[in-house]
Image (spheres, rainbow, N blue to C red):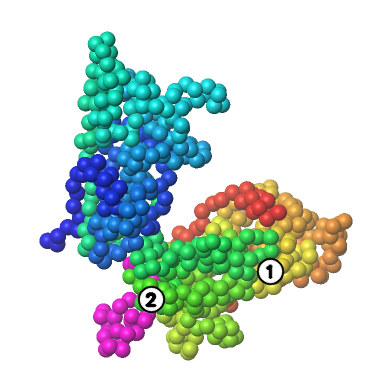
Amino acid sequence: MPGSTFQTNPYDLNKLLDDCHRGILQLPDFQRSWVWDEDRIRSLIASISRAFPIGALMTLDNGGDVNFKPRPIEGTPAEAKQMVPHSLLLDGQQRMTSLYQVAWRGKVVETVNTKKKKIKRWFYIDIRKTLDPFFDREDAIIGVPEDRVLRTDFGREAVLDLSSVDQEYAYLMYPVSRVFDWDKWQDGFDKHWRGDENESTREEFRVFKRQILENFKYYRVPVIALDRSTPKEAVCVVFEKVNTGGKPLDAFELVTAMYASEGHELRKDWYGDDGIKGRHRRLAETLRPPGLDTGILANVANTDFLQAISLFYTRDLRRAAESAGKKGKELPAVTGNRQALLNLPLEAYKKYELPVERGFEQVAKFLHMLHIYRIFDLPYQSQIIPLAAILADIGDAWEHEANRAKLVRWYWNGVFGELYGSAIDTRIARDFLEVPVWLKGGPEPSTISETMFRADRLKTMRMRVSAAYKGVNALLMKEGAQDFRSGQKFDHTVFFGENVDIHHIFPKEWCKNEKIRPDVYDSIINKTPLSYKTNRIIGGLAPSDYLEILQKGNDETPCIAPDRLDVYLASHLINPLLLRANRFYDFMADRQKRLLSLIEQATGRTAYYGEIVDDEDVEEDEDVFEAERTISAE
């Protein structure tokens, strides 16, 4: 059997704190700063005072395959930073830092209260209250300000003054900073309470020492120690499973720590520093709409960016293996999965970071060309990754008409084939390999050949988070849909200036009055992009009524000739005669055919008319949703 890559052993708490103090035990640099508040610190002290378990720690032996940049525990002396640590603390940072700060460092603790306001505290144990079995132990742990005077009445009245050691003796308040070194404090305590008449008080302290302080001195913490042979992927997985108190560790954090050991600050690349915009902000502001802080790329994650780079790096590895004569299973996979990210060398990152950033910038232009302007309307966030990598790979060639038409077709097949919803790692890699070859005259990529759009799917698309639902909306705008009221096409300026969104054609209230089922009238077939003002005119009226209002006009809207209005309606793939006659079911059947033809044209694939599988969208409250979208747009 293969050997285990970890051991579990109990360690003395005071030894662990001393290791932190000397820099023998440090943190990997991806760990966040210490963040525990006063109440959590008090609770931790109370648990140890009762010898209650505080959970296991997890460490990683320094060196080996996982080479992280170390960082000392917060508050340790400068000498600790010069030490090469023996181990790195993966899980337990908050607990160990809290204990080091309050029980070992000997300085005031800078923490926060429950309102996240910064405060400075010394912590004390009320000797008498801890010995009272009926007193809540956490209430026996006291935090006092930096001057060691606890006040009430807005700071005017001192209710507990521990500003001298004699005052600590007098109030029987034991400083937590001395829990591992009580002899000198006890000597002073005995002198303060000398005399036969105070023997009971001195005995009280001796009981306190046996029942409370010795719990600290002999406290042992279970430590799961991962050895040097532990692979990166295992470190990531194990950390995510056990580190419930800290922030989740993703591949970006691990790669950041590994690059830091080589002197490169990946986090600064992404988030920026000292007034310099990081890559995340630069991407978020690409083609930013007027009045908004961010554009269509605002949700591109750091791991998305690394995935795109990994596609290039793993393709390089595969090409090198092919040149060496390797075949079949000997060839490394082209992938952007997490394991590939953990194996991404700094050299490859530096080689491809700028081309990939340029690729993402081109994605924004591509999506705007398809009339996809908002993150809210983006069918698949995940499809951006292969698109950015493809655009980075082919460069300006995507602007050639024939290539652009193919890329558009590939994109819509991914959307209407609903292929980027789950298990996408393989899909991303295949598209990255296949699409550029296709652009040069090779075979169709599998994303196109595998797409099958069911004709009846339109009837079940009712949810705004559905990729295909969003796709229909974008296709209508791309094909030149004109607003019912203004006749304007929904370009970038009109879209944001007129608060365009998707709305019912036969209004919801009218449908309810006609006893039409929600699962029928809420489908995408009965919806289309319209401006906020137009939707207000439509209200809950019958189509024949709101069309008449549009034709007659009002103080805000000029009248529209019936034949001109029919042109506007037709641009939405609406049969004007059926809409004017309020023939709902005939309208639905007719528009389904028209929308289906639009999708077939976009994908280059014939729809499937066979039996439908259960792929219905989940219901939602459309009224509330549309109201929220309208309010947020105003």
- Please say if 341 is above or below 402: above
Q: Main secondary structure of the magenta part?
A: helix
From the top left corner, tell me how far across and down residue 99 is, in percent: 33, 40
The amino acid on which the numbered mark 1 sits, given as a three-letter code, is His
> Could you tell me which quadrant the N terminus lies in?
bottom left
Residue located at (24% from left, 56% from top): 86
- Please say if 235 is above or below 477: above
632 horizontally vs 338: left or right: right
Residue 107 found in image quarter: top left
SS at badge 2 = helix
103 or 607: nearer the viewer: 103
171 horizontally vs 522: left or right: left
Q: What span is colored magenta in the figure?
A: 315-342
- Please say if 476 is above or below 217: below
Q: Is residue 328 magenta?
A: yes
From the top left corner, tell me how far across and down residue 245 is, in percent: 37, 46
90 or 475: nearer the viewer: 90
Residue 613 found in image quarter: bottom left
Q: Which mark is residue 257?
A: none
Using the rendered image of the protein, determine whether residue 244 is visible from the camera's viewpoint. no
Give the residue pinned by disc 2: 347
337 or 405: nearer the viewer: 337
> Could you tell me which quadrant the C terminus lies in?
bottom right
Residue located at (54% from left, 58% from top): 465
SS at badge 1 = helix
**Of marks 1 and 2, which one's residue comes earlier in the chain?**
2
**Residue at far left of view:** 1
Spatial CA span between label 1 and label 2: 39 Å
Give the residue pinned by disc 1: 492
Q: Is residue 391 magenta?
A: no
How packed mark 1 is, by other alpha carbons closer than 10 Å (few <14, some 14-19, many 20 or more), is some
